[in-house]
Amino acid sequence: MRAHFYILGLTIFSLFNSHAWSAQSNAPAKTNIPGTGFYLNPPLGFELSTRFPGFIMNEFQSSIVVTEMSAPYPVISKKFTKPALKGTGMALLSKEAITFNGKKGTLIHIQQSNYGISFLKWVALVGDSKHTAIITASFPEFKKELLSKPIRNSILSMEWRTPKSANPFLGLNFRIQDQPNLKLAKKMGNSIILTTDGKFSPKLSKDPFFMLGASYTQGIVVDDKKKFSTKRFMKTKQMKNIKISSTREVTHGGLKGIEILGTGKDEVLGHDVLIYQVILFDKRSYFVGQGFSPVSEKKKYTTLFKQVMHSFKPKMSGIY
């Protein structure tokens, strides 16, 4: 499997489904986003999120989310074209070159509808030849007069410094343990990625990998958990010919959920892939674990993926 490209696609176009209250000129001092090297002036009324690296204002379904990638800025920035965004239900409103602490950047304005509500996004991309950060701010369009300018100013106040801690779980509200042949490789946004050698490479590969993260949104009530999990499984990114082989109820870390096993065909490399998925539900949201490996290693990695999930420990009252 190609962990980098799968996660890249998932991150870029799922970030925009995350949904900051606004601002006065006397903004608070710059605040560090735990687990990252980012500091910014959050708009008045924002608070640090307990589910992802960033800030949130639940009252207006608005958020600022930071995601760091081990990928070249020139490559990532080219993904944000009008045709590419249109293909995912987003309209590009504007795009301009900017700089952050001497690093090249791009500021993008986007419109997207979710759950029958039109949202506007300010998206900042910044990086170099090896790394890229994406800062995504989302807010309802009907609040644009109140929110748009303060949120834009907040993003533009961002500073990117060297993180104080190398702890990959800092800023997250869960823990997992790596396993033989599945080593902790990287934190990306609100997710942890495990690979066979503990390294995260942008090169195409069929190597197995596992990722686990908390959903960006809160306040979600899922009545039919099996239907919800099945629908998500059948829409697994960059897979076709998806088939389900088993579905069962599970409990990990005190949370109940649905585990699904199946197969699909990699749209890029063309090989058959084992797809493992677990969604665990809490009162307000959910956690998603996904594992991928060549079908030829199905038995081995099904066991390893399950062992990772057995190690899952949530912290529902906040972040680590």
Image: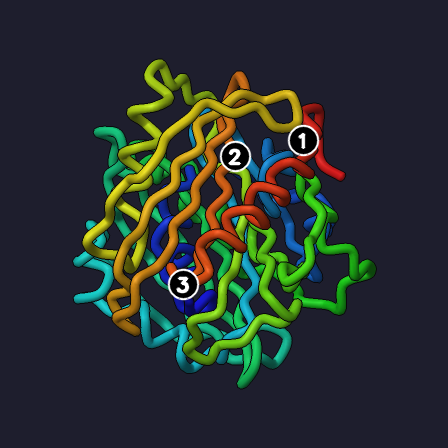
**Residue drawn 26% across the image and 30% down it:** 115
**Residue drawn 37% across the image and 21% down it:** 225
- Disc 3 marks a residue whose amino acid type is Ser
- Disc 1 marks a residue whose amino acid type is Pro
Q: Would residue 15 be found to the left or right of residue 281 on screen? A: left
Q: Give the crowd class for mark 2: few <14, some 14-19, many >=20 residues within 10 Å.
A: many
Instruction: Looking at this view, name the residue that lies furthest to the top.
Output: 223
Mark positioned earlier in the residue sequence (3 or 1): 3
Mark 2 secondary-structure assignment: strand
Instruction: Looking at this view, name the residue that lies furthest to the right.
Output: 164
Place of residue 15 in the rendered image (x, y in percent of width and height, measured from the top left) = 41, 49
Q: Is 51 in front, or is 193? A: 193
Residue assigned mark 3 = 296
Mark 3 secondary-structure assignment: helix
- Disc 2 marks a residue whose amino acid type is Phe
Labelled pair 2, 1 in contact (Cβ < 8 Å)? yes
Relative to 236, does residue 124 appear above or below in the rendering? below
Q: Is 194 in front, or is 249? A: 249
Residue 154 seen in the figure: no
Q: Give the crowd class for mark 1: few <14, some 14-19, many >=20 residues within 10 Å.
A: many
**Residue drawn 21% across the image and 56% down it:** 240
Residue assigned mark 1 = 314
**Residue drawn 48% across the image and 52% down it:** 299
Mark positioned earlier in the residue sequence (3 or 2): 2
Distance in Å between CA atoms under marks 3 and 2: 28 Å
Q: Quadrant of the C terminus?
A: top right
Distance in Å between CA atoms under marks 3 and 1: 32 Å
Labelled pair 3, 1 in contact (Cβ < 8 Å)? no
Place of residue 282 in the rendered image (x, y in percent of width and height, measured from the top left) = 54, 21
As drawn, the label of residue 287 is 2
Mark positioned earlier in the residue sequence (2 or 1): 2
Place of residue 213 in the rendered image (x, y in percent of width and height, measured from the top left) = 54, 43
